[in-house]
Image (cartoon, rainbow, N blue to C red):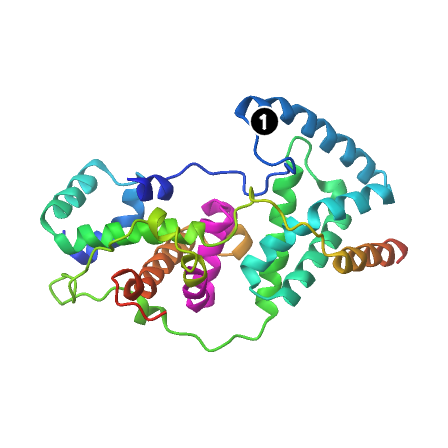
């Protein structure tokens, strides 16, 4: 397996979607290639950082609901209902 | 390896209806049937055209839907437009809401769809080519340049207050079709099929774009996490 192929397989490897032989080839390459060990580590960290980059839905919502937007929506609803 | 755990992590409900904050597991379990009853009662009133119920729904959900729209559109005015469109879509299609489905999940999908429609209507800004952001390989398939491991894990990096802003800035630099897939899959946590339906592309195209988006994001973050920081 080349480094190019290794990188192409990363997402499937992390998702557990490689066949047995593909996984074996992948892990053999990982055992031999320092660049790909580093690349896999960086890739996983990138995914984790991306997922954490925005406020999670279980963080507290802003205290104030944007009232102007709420009123605009309700007005649009009334208009929609009447037409 | 917590980064691997996060990458393979279970899907969380990205659009939780809870406004009570986190409780213990037992408290959450006992609160769930009550929330479902509340949701069922609200749906009955919405289907009956109860205007007070509509106002209740808008007040209860606007903030969270706005957060979702902001993540995708990155622009407050467009995000508000998308939320307004989303609610109009909800009002039009409330009769079609499937029994047994989660209202919160349905609303999430509607606002994501409204944000994507807004995105499609926007004039495209000049973009970097994704090819310039993908890893480069020599003819023999080896990495063209050596790859340095990053010294910090995600957990450590996220303890620095500037990290999230940096990551968002790098996500914003991705070409739009790749940025959108990354947002839908990794941030909004839609599965491949859902993302494919909303984007009107194949599931395979979603997978390819997601992998490229992640690789490109890695390239953009690399100078900062190798310690050659140009923040």
Q: Residues within 10 Å of mark 1 (few under 14, many from 20)?
A: some
Q: Residue at x 27, y 43 (%)?
A: A13
Magenta: main secondary structure: helix
Residue A58, given in percent of the width and then of the height, sits at 56, 41
Q: Can residue B78 be seen in this view?
A: yes
Q: Which residue is drawn at 23% across and 55% down?
A: A39
Of residues A36 and A28, the one nearer the viewer is A36
Which residues lie in the magenta part? B167-195
The residue sitting at the bottom extreme is B126
Residue B114, given in percent of the width and then of the height, sits at 64, 57
Of residues B222 and B50, the one nearer the viewer is B222
Task: Give the SS element for disc 1.
Answer: helix
Residue B215 relative to residue B53: left or right: left
Position above or below: B39 against B61? above
Residue B205 relative to residue A27: left or right: right
Residue B172, given in percent of the width and then of the height, sits at 46, 66
Position above or below: A58 against B110? above
Instruction: Give the quarter of the image for residue B148.
Output: bottom left
Look at mark 1 in the image and give the residue it sits on: B28
């Amino acid at each position: 397996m080349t480094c190019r192929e290794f990188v192409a397989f990363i997402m499937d490897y992390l998702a557990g979607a490689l066949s047995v032989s593909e996984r074996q080839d992948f892990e053999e390459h990982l055992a031999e290639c320092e660049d790909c060990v580093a690349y896999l580590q960086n890739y996983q960290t990138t995914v984790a950082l991306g997922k954490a980059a925005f406020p999670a839905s279980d963080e507290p919502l802003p205290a104030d609901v944007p009232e102007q937007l709420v009123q605009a929506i309700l007005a649009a609803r009334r208009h929609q209902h009447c037409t | 390896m917590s980064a691997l755990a996060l990458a393979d992590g279970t899907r969380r409900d990205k659009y939780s209806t809870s406004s009570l904050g986190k409780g213990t597991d037992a408290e959450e379990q006992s609160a769930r049937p009550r929330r479902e009853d509340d949701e069922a009662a609200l749906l009955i009133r919405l289907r009956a055209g109860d205007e007070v119920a509509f106002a209740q729904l808008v007040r209860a959900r606007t903030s969270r839907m706005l957060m979702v729209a902001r993540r995708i559109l990155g622009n407050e005015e467009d995000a508000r437009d998308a939320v307004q469109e989303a609610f109009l879509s909800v009002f039009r299609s409330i009769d079609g809401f499937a029994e047994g489905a989660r209202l919160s999940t349905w609303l999430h999908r509607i606002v994501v769809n409204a944000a994507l429609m807004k995105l499609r209507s926007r004039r495209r800004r000049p973009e970097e080519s994704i090819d310039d952001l993908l890893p480069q390989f020599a003819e023999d398939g080896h990495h063209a340049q050596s790859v340095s491991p990053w010294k910090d894990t995600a957990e450590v990096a996220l303890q620095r207050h500037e990290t999230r802003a940096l990551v968002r800035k790098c996500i914003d630099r991705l070409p739009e079709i790749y940025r959108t897939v990354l947002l839908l899959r990794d941030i909004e946590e839609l599965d491949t099929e859902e993302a494919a339906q909303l984007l009107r592309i194949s599931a395979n195209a979603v997978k390819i774009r997601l992998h490229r988006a992640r690789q490109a994001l890695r390239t953009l973050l690399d100078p900062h996490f190798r310690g050659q920081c140009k923040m």
